[in-house]
Image (spheres, rainbow, N blue to C red):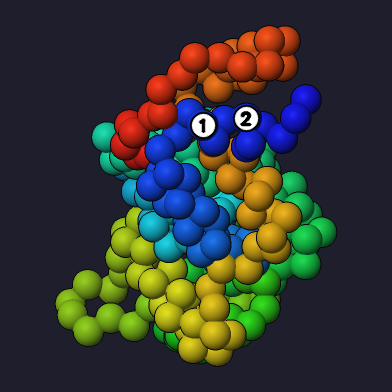
Amino acid sequence: MDDPAALLEPFLLPARIERLREAARQRTRNLRVVLDGVHDPHNLSAAVRSCDGFGVLELHVIESAKPFRVRRKVSQGTEKWIRIHRHPSPLEAVAALRAEGFELWVADPRPGGRPVDDLPWEKKLALVFGNEKDGASRETSQAAAGFFCIPMYGFGDSFNVSVAAGVALAVAVRERLRRLGRHGDLSAAEQEELIAEWMRRAVKNADRILTHLATRGSADHEPSDEPLEE
């Protein structure tokens, strides 16, 4: 089959294609978020939305007790634009991330954690967020390079998981831009692969269209301008 992106491009308006390309340029694979035993659907879905908003392409979810479920009213459909890796146990998540060369840093509001803006953002980092009651699992904590905290200046001593993830990612983008001069880190080939993946999700009945074009070579069509979030 010919290049899927090239075949699907006529089904999208130029402005939508440029939006996909710009988002791909800003995506990073060297910064990951790990949700360890987080069960609240609202927190899970809000974290998905934060990952998309701050250019994080890959989210890891440890499903120790309950399967991962997204609430689209909260995520606003952004789960379509990130890659979600599901792990049945903390040890499997740790092994997968270590195999890709990631350092794990666990969010922990207790005293002694490293301030979030002082993390080694030049490295490949996986930020781990546990559930609000128990925190990250023992296995993940033992495998981590360290713990980090988000400074607070009020009476509360912690943020909920989705807020903590959003704050940490905002700091991550700022520090990566300051230290590295860029946030997005996908190669040109990786960007094109991602754009093709996104086009399959942005074009209605994309797989059927590709099959049709492969057998007939052309089809009547109208470019789509449906919102990318839907």
Q: Is residue 84 above or below residue 111?
A: above
Tell me residue 205's x, y (percent): 51, 17
Residue found 67% across the figure and 78% down from its top: 123
Tell me residue 85's x, y (percent): 63, 43
* 185 left or right, relative to 225: right
Residue found 37% across the figure and 63% down from its top: 166
CB under 8 Å between callouts 1 and 2? yes
Q: Nearer the viewer, residue 91 or 190?
A: 190
Residue found 64% across the figure and 11% down from its top: 212
What is the quadrant of the C terminus in the image? top left
Residue type, label 1: Pro
Residue type, label 2: Leu
> For mark 1, does the 10 Å Cα neighbourhood hold few (<14), some (14 to 19), or many (20 or more) residues?
some
- In which image quadrant can residue 209 be found? top right
Tell me residue 13's x, y (percent): 40, 38
| Residue bearing mark 1 | 10
**The label number, if any, that marks residue 190 in the structure image:** none
- In which image quadrant can residue 207 be found? top right
* 149 left or right, relative to 121: left
Tell me residue 224's x, y (percent): 38, 29
Residue 223 in view (yes/no) = yes
* 69 left or right, relative to 212: left
Whole-angstrom CA distance, mark 1 to mark 2, is: 7 Å
**The label number, if any, that marks residue 7 in the structure image:** 2
Q: Residue furthest right?
A: 99
Task: Give the secondary structure at mark 1.
Answer: helix
What is the quadrant of the N terminus in the image? top right
Q: Nearer the viewer, residue 197 or 222?
A: 222
Q: Nearer the viewer, residue 33 or 106?
A: 33
Residue 109 in view (yes/no) = no
Task: Give the secondary structure at mark 2.
Answer: helix
